[in-house]
Amino acid sequence: MLDAALLAGTHDRECVFEAFTRRLPTGRRYGILAGTGRLLDLVQRFRFEEPELEWLRSNHVVRDATLDWLADYRFSGTISGYREGEVFFPGSPFLVVDAPFAEGVILETLILSVFNYDSAVASAAARMVTAAVGRPLAEMGSRRANEGAAVAAARAAFIAGFSATSNLEAGRTWGVPTMGTAAHAFTLLHDSEEDAFRAQVDALGPGTTLLVDTFDVEHAIDLAVKVAGPQLGAVRLDSGDLPNLVRTVRAQLDGLGATNTRITVTNDLDEFTIAALQASPVDSYGVGTSVVTGSGFPASGMVYKLVAHRSHNGDGEWIPVAKKSEGKASIAGRKHPVRRLNPSGTAIAEAIHIVENGAAPDDNGRSLLVPLMTDGEAHPEFLGAAGTIAARSHREAAMRELPDQAFRLGRGDPVLPTIYV
């Protein structure tokens, strides 16, 4: 597309691109947007260096004139969108890119790869946070994702309300709190389970978390309290019939005087198994596979479409454009989404205004678009660890606006209707 547009002379037409999702995953009532801070950093650093250019050249992918254009590529446009952590619904543009066609179209895969994955993780994680009813959750899914996705997933889960991650790179890069426990391999390394527990307590102190289901849980609990004393920080259960096992372990710990020792569980949990443990004396959860795979929906169905461009005759008129494909039709023209609230502050609808020349709509609802990048420079408040914390805070505020039925785990339609005005 870029090569052909450069040849045709249409590459520099001013354009408006919008990213949105056509639908939520089956049965989901809302989505949580994540990835904005990552994307803005990536766009600022998006370059074609000599190795990439040489590969394109040697494989005759594009013409030499296009290679010259790519060598000088720097995004110079403007991006607005939802704040990271915002709740999203079908049809509402969470990202708007104003740029010449060539600059905007080349970012499509980058934009969608970031938002489709990060938002899938955050949307699933938010449901798990609801199911946990205030008990902390740790993200532990790095071994179920590729090395880049593992870091992105840890960040997205934190934005959605998880308390910590086992991925240290997410802590280094994004400021996500980190934690971890010993694996079964550590117990099996030692001559006895007691030796393993002593080695861990000697290194980390009695407040550590001991894994107690390598062999026999009842015996391991006795050993754990014997080694660490009643001030043992926590025990971790990674197998078994958890509702019954947790109750038994709690009674055993209390009987040994370890009344403040916490119980954390980590056995292939998702939002439904977490909800099933609400009545059990669980203190915290560790979630792996389910959170990094979006709990069955590893992508968010997001698309990136051209919705308007300037006319070619030089009069500056904006021309709305849209595709009409069956089942994939889009709506032409620049849009401005507004979340309408009732007098008590509860969200009741997503109102999408078709606007001309960027004029703000006359609507009393909460405007959802904010400036994210101006003239190719990202607004710094959305970047890095500080941006990640801000996204987590905004997610909390946005979810407080949702009606109660949004938090039911059973299948249902989007909790807010999307209306075009």
Image (cartoon, rainbow, N blue to C red):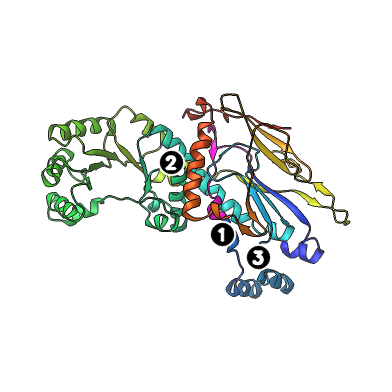
Identify the residue position indicated by label 1 in the image. 42
Q: Earlier in the sequence, mark 2 or mark 3?
A: 3
Say whether residue 136 is left or right of residue 54.
Answer: left
Whether residue 117 is situated above or below residue 24 in the rendered picture: below
Is residue 293 visible to us here? no
Q: Do the residues labelled 3 and 1 touch (CB within 8 Å)?
A: no
Residue at screen point 60% across, 63% down: 46
Quarter of the image with the C terminus is top right
Residue at screen point 59% across, 43% down: 301
Say whether residue 387 is left or right of residue 288.
Answer: right
Q: Earlier in the sequence, mark 3 or mark 1?
A: 1
- Residue 313 x %, y %: 89, 56
Q: Give, as a single range, the part of the protein colored magenta.
A: 22-39
Q: Is residue 275 magenta?
A: no
Using a 10 Å C-alpha cutoff, classify the residue at mark 2 as few (fewer than 14 neighbours), some (14 to 19) or many (20 or more): many
- Residue 346 x %, y %: 56, 27
Element type where label 2 sits in the image: loop
Element type where label 1 sits in the image: helix
Magenta stretch mostly in which secondary structure? loop
Identify the residue position indicated by label 3 in the image. 74
